[in-house]
């Protein structure tokens, strides 16, 4: 149950700590700032819709490659080509595809380093051009819009095959302006560089540097005369970087060896053409790499074959000469076995030595393959040393025959082996197949992948809503206006007599007043007459009751209604409070004391003339200035003609005499005065009243402003009786007269009240 404050039965004290976050208060803040949230959301949503429909469409195409783990060399070549086989990781293949070697060649082949396109009107020109091309199927060119003839508006086309410029001008924009019958001008920095005709190569030496030449070949130019095109020759690095940003290479799955190449482009044909070119270049270079490795090995063998052939012929001649001199010598079976082993070991040693020499062209001495071959050679040399020791036990003639025969057999074996390998490599080179093959070529995409209109609009809506909420809280943070009457009571030590909630009924009356006009005598904007059950009017009735007891010991029956600044609702409070007081049977006089910008007469539907200023000047009598308001049952005196010196008029003794006379003839005199901080009129009027009530608009005044207002009134001897807290947001005082956690609810239909 809530804790009831017994000192004020109409107020319920909060049971929770005021420092805790009040979700209801936050929700009320958002409700109060709903129009700001709607405005920000609408603005951001409009930008999102514009972006969704103005962004240039982006198309995406893909190519699929397969990376084989082994090259497809014939099985017969596997023993010889172990060092040539490539088990290159897939990541290495991906980096090779994105290398300058591949992308640079593709750019040169397709001319991607030359960018030529029409110049469109900023922001919307390109979208208008696309719309025109969608509606028009023929080769028509759109007429210029907005009298901007040099912009392209749809149907224009250009193709530049050759564009040569100095390196210093790369990545800079040139303007190509179309002329009559295929003629054009090339402009750089507002200077015509050269003139030419479509279909002809045009070149021109630079006047300031004859060594430099500008050349251009335009193969296609379709446009109206005076239409301008942007032509840029990109540097190779810039073109490669831009292509690399739009190119994606990734492996599909894990360890599948399948690569997917995707490319985003503003045109469908370009996406397909560039992707196919990149794939073909990479496959061709992969095959050329394998062929180059085979050619390198074949070259090494062809260098060794003539040397081995000479060694074989020399060894054969020496053996034949020795046999002729010594006669035929037959070797026994044991000696033949020794010779056979010696020949095999020497042959293997020589082959391994050749393989080592080939490896050393790629690797260092510490490479594992080189170390393994060195160990094999060392082992074979040990066996050869053992065979040599056995040969030394044979007769001298047999030793010589065996040595010479061994040389012949070793040379013959080596020559035959290398000759066969060379022939095999020639066959393999002719049928070389790379490690990469193209599985799927690129196809024309059906629809653009960007912009995703629904997603953009949805994100824009959410972002706008978020920014709107942030704007509400930021406005709340920056605007340090007091929104809690308890703060005013604690800081100023002045009681809050009433909290007047914001009235939607008054908004409707104001709108009706503005639409239909305010006719004299018609009270179309006085809420106390149009809707007596409005919460704002009921709060003024509560103020009436409080004022009755507060005025019991007052020196007179004159009260002052003032406030810190303009636009806080003083006129609304004064006029409706007079009506409420008159309903209670009081004889009330309402005086508009704001002789600068008083507007009560407009609210009551009467004129300004013959009012307070004329009374003080004694140009009319008091009786002639009084306006009877029959429906509201009170009298009213307007400001009269706006004088040049309101403060001096109010200081005149005739003004005091007028108030004394009015106090004797009426039960209550209400004076609506100008703002305290703006002028001194309120201080002058307040000295003649018994009580002053300061109207404060919720959330409109920093506490320092209210303190300054109080200080000025007290310095002039004015008794500040209380504060009227006006225009409290509905979310802060819903269906009641309290504020925040203090609410007093009424059920007007049942005419009963209940505390909550």
Image (cartoon, grey):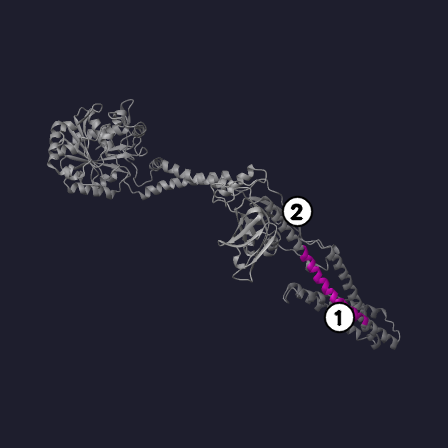
Q: Say which mark, if any, is on residue 384.
A: 1
* Nearer to me, 320 or 640: 640
Q: Give the range drawn in magenta.
A: 287-313
- Is residue 479 located in the magenta-colored stretch of the structure? no
Labels in figure, total: 2
* Residue 401, quarter of the rendered image: bottom right
Q: Earlier in the sequence, mark 1 or mark 2?
A: 1
Of the pair 378 and 170, the residue shown nearer to us: 170
Camera-side mark, 1 or 2: 2
Distance CA(mark 1)–CA(mark 2): 54 Å
State the image coordinates of residue 110 (x, y, percent, origin top left). Answer: 61, 51
Q: Position of residue 293 (x, y in %)?
A: 69, 60
Nearer to me, 436 or 652: 652
293 is within the stretch colored magenta: yes
Q: Is mark 2 on a helix, strand or loop?
A: strand
Quadrant the N terminus occupies: top left
Quadrant in which the C terminus is drawn:
top left
For the stretch drawn in magenta, what is the main secondary structure? Answer: helix
Q: Residues within 10 Å of mark 1 (few under 14, many from 20)?
A: some
Left-right relation of 476 to 250 = left
């Amino acid at each position: 149950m809530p804790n009831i404050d017994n000192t004020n039965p109409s107020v319920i004290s909060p049971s929770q700590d005021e420092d805790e976050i009040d979700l209801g208060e936050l929700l009320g803040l958002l409700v109060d700032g709903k129009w700001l949230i709607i405005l920000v959301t609408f603005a951001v949503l409009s930008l999102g819709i514009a972006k969704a429909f103005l962004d240039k469409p982006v198309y995406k195409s893909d190519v699929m490659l397969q990376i084989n783990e082994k090259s497809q060399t014939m099985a017969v070549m596997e023993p010889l080509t172990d060092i040539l086989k490539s088990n290159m990781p897939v990541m290495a293949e991906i980096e090779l595809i994105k290398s300058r070697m591949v992308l640079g060649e593709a750019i040169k082949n397709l001319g991607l380093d030359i960018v030529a396109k029409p110049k469109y009107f900023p922001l919307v020109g390109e979208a208008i051009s696309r719309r025109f091309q969608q509606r028009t199927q023929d080769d028509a060119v759109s007429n210029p819009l907005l009298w901007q003839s040099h912009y392209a508006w749809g149907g224009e086309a250009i193709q530049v095959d050759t564009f040569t410029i100095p390196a210093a001008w790369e990545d800079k924009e040139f303007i190509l302006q179309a002329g009559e019958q295929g003629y054009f001008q090339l402009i750089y920095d507002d200077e015509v560089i050269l003139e030419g005709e479509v279909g002809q190569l045009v070149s021109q030496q630079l006047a300031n540097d004859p060594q430099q030449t500008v050349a251009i070949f335009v193969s296609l130019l379709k446009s109206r005369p005076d239409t301008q095109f942007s032509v840029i020759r990109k540097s190779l690095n810039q073109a490669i970087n831009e292509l690399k940003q739009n190119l994606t290479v990734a492996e599909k799955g894990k360890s599948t060896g399948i690569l997917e190449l995707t490319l985003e482009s503003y045109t469908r044909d370009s996406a397909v053409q560039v992707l196919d070119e990149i794939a073909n270049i990479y496959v061709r270079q992969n095959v050329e790499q394998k062929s180059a490795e085979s050619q390198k090995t074949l070259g090494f063998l062809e260098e060794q074959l003539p040397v081995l052939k000479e060694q074989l012929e020399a060894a054969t001649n020496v053996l034949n000469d020795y046999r002729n001199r010594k006669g035929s010598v037959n070797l026994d079976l044991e000696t033949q076995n020794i010779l056979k082993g010696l020949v095999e070991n020497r042959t293997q040693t020589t082959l391994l030595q050749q393989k080592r020499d080939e490896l050393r062209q790629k690797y260092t001495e510490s490479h594992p393959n080189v170390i393994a071959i060195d160990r094999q050679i060392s082992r074979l040399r040990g066996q050869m040393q053992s065979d040599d020791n056995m040969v030394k036990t044979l007769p001298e003639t047999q030793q010589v025959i065996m040595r010479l025969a061994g040389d012949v057999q070793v040379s013959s074996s080596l020559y035959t082996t290398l000759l066969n390998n060379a022939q095999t490599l020639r066959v393999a080179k002719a049928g070389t197949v790379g490690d990469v093959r193209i599985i799927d070529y690129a196809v024309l995409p059906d629809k653009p992948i960007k912009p995703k209109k629904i997603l953009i609009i949805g994100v824009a809506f959410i972002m706008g809503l978020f920014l709107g909420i942030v704007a509400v809280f930021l406005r709340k943070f920056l605007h340090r206006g007091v929104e809690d009457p308890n703060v005013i009571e604690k800081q100023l030590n002045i009681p809050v007599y009433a909290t007047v909630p914001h009235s939607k009924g008054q908004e409707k009356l104001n709108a009706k007043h503005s639409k239909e006009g305010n006719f004299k005598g018609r009270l179309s904007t006085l809420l106390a007459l149009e809707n007596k059950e409005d919460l704002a009017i009921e709060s003024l009735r509560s103020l009436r009751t409080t004022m009755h007891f507060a005025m019991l010991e007052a020196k007179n029956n004159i009260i002052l209604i003032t406030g810190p600044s303009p636009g806080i609702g003083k006129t609304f409070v004064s006029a409706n409070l007079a009506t409420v007081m008159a309903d209670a049977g009081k004889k009330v006089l309402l005086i508009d004391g704001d002789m600068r910008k008083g507007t009560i007469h407009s609210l009551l539907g009467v004129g300004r003339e013959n009012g307070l200023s004329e009374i003080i000047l004694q140009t009319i009598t008091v009786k002639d200035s009084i306006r009877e308001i029959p429906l509201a049952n009170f009298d009213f005196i307007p400001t009269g003609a706006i004088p040049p010196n309101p403060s001096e008029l109010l200081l005149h003794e005739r003004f005091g005499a007028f108030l004394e006379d009015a106090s004797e003839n009426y039960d209550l005199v209400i004076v609506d005065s100008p703002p305290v901080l703006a002028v001194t009129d309120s201080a002058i009027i307040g000295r003649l009243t018994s009580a002053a009530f300061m109207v404060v608009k919720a959330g409109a005044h920093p506490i320092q402003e209210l303190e300054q207002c109080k200080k000025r009134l007290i310095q002039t001897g004015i008794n500040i009786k209380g504060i009227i807290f006006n225009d409290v947001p509905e979310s802060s005082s819903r269906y009641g007269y309290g504020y925040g956690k203090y609410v007093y609810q009424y059920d007007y239909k049942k005419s009963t009240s209940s505390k909550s």
